[in-house]
Amino acid sequence: MFFFVLPGFIIYSVFFAGPTVAALFLSFTDWNGIAPTFNYVGFSNYTNMLTDDPIFVQSLGNNLKFTLGVLIFQTVLSLFFAMLLVKNTKANIFYRAVYFFPTIVASVSVAFVWTFMYDPNIGVINNILSAVGLESLAKSWLGDRNIAIYSLAFVQFWAHTGQMLIIFVAGLHAIPKELYEAAEIEGASKWQTFKSITWPLLAPSATIVVAYTTIQSFKAFDLVIAMTGGGPSYATEILSTFLYHEAFINFRFGYASAAAVIFMIIIAIVTVLQFRLLKSNDVKF
């Protein structure tokens, strides 16, 4: 039995447990990633980050805005489209494939396409707005620090809504049709049917969608780096790009490790809270 679990244990230890312990250890040092020696600094990395680092605080705030925007719109839209395309007709299967397609495209490719579309001079979006007489709505979508993070959030949920749609479709197919027939006989409205049958029985699927979307949004590194690099003026800097800049640009691996530990704790807390909120799976009339 031991030899059956050994490969999985080795992979888990090398690629997860080991790096996690190493990051925790390095978070108490001032290692720069190059020097063979380092000094122990205790909790100073953590205290400086939480009390005297406005960029970290801004990154955390940006990440929360980004995650919340993606979570709300991606979950609502994917559920809406899933309910529209739940029947296995040829047209619905085709549309599911169309919506799913951006998911299999590399994030960097998606970033390049949307960077062009957001371009304030030759971008498709501003050109369309100008063509229909809405020039006043044309903006520098990635250059305006007040809206840049929301522009990135739109690209994120555009690219991954189709992925969540498939999960919801699978959840909808697992709901017994007899429940809907019973609700129809009882004279339940569509809203009552959704509230009492569809949503409660979709709880497992919704839990997966919400948890995965949250983790995915917190880790949206490649999209942000490719489109804005964290700018302008750190307006789109999120925790994952903050880690990158601190470790590989500023060579503060100890400091970046402390940020990684905080990052991991935040994701763990948010995920646990989401599972607790969505674990109810009772059908109530």
Image (spheres, grey):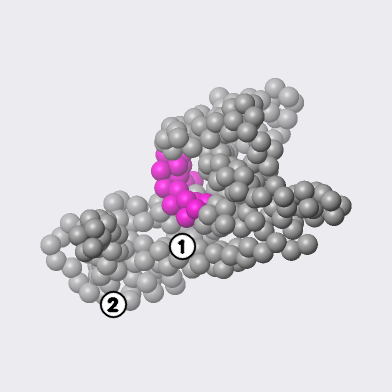
Q: Secondary structure at mark 1?
A: helix
Instruction: Tally the numbered discs.
Output: 2
Q: Which residues are the magenta region?
A: 212-233
Q: Position of residue 279 (x, y in %)?
A: 58, 65
**Dot 2 and dot 1 residues touching (CB under 8 Å):** no
26 in relation to 214, above or below? below
The crowd level at tag 1 (other Cα within 10 Å; few <14, some 14-19, many 20+) is some
Q: Nearer the viewer, residue 67 or 163?
A: 163
Report which quarter residue 24 is drawn in: bottom left
Residue at mark 2 to residue at mark 1: CA–CA distance: 23 Å
Identified at 50% across, 67% down, the residue is 272
Q: Which residue is mark 1?
A: 267
Residue 222: say if magenta.
Answer: yes
Whether residue 64 appears in this view of the structure is yes
Residue lying farthest left? 36
**What amino acid is at disc 2?**
Gly
Residue drawn at the location 56% of the way across and 39% of the way down = 162
Residue receiving disc 2: 42
Give the mark nearest the N terminus, 2 or 1: 2
- Look at 40% across and 64% down and name the residue there: 264
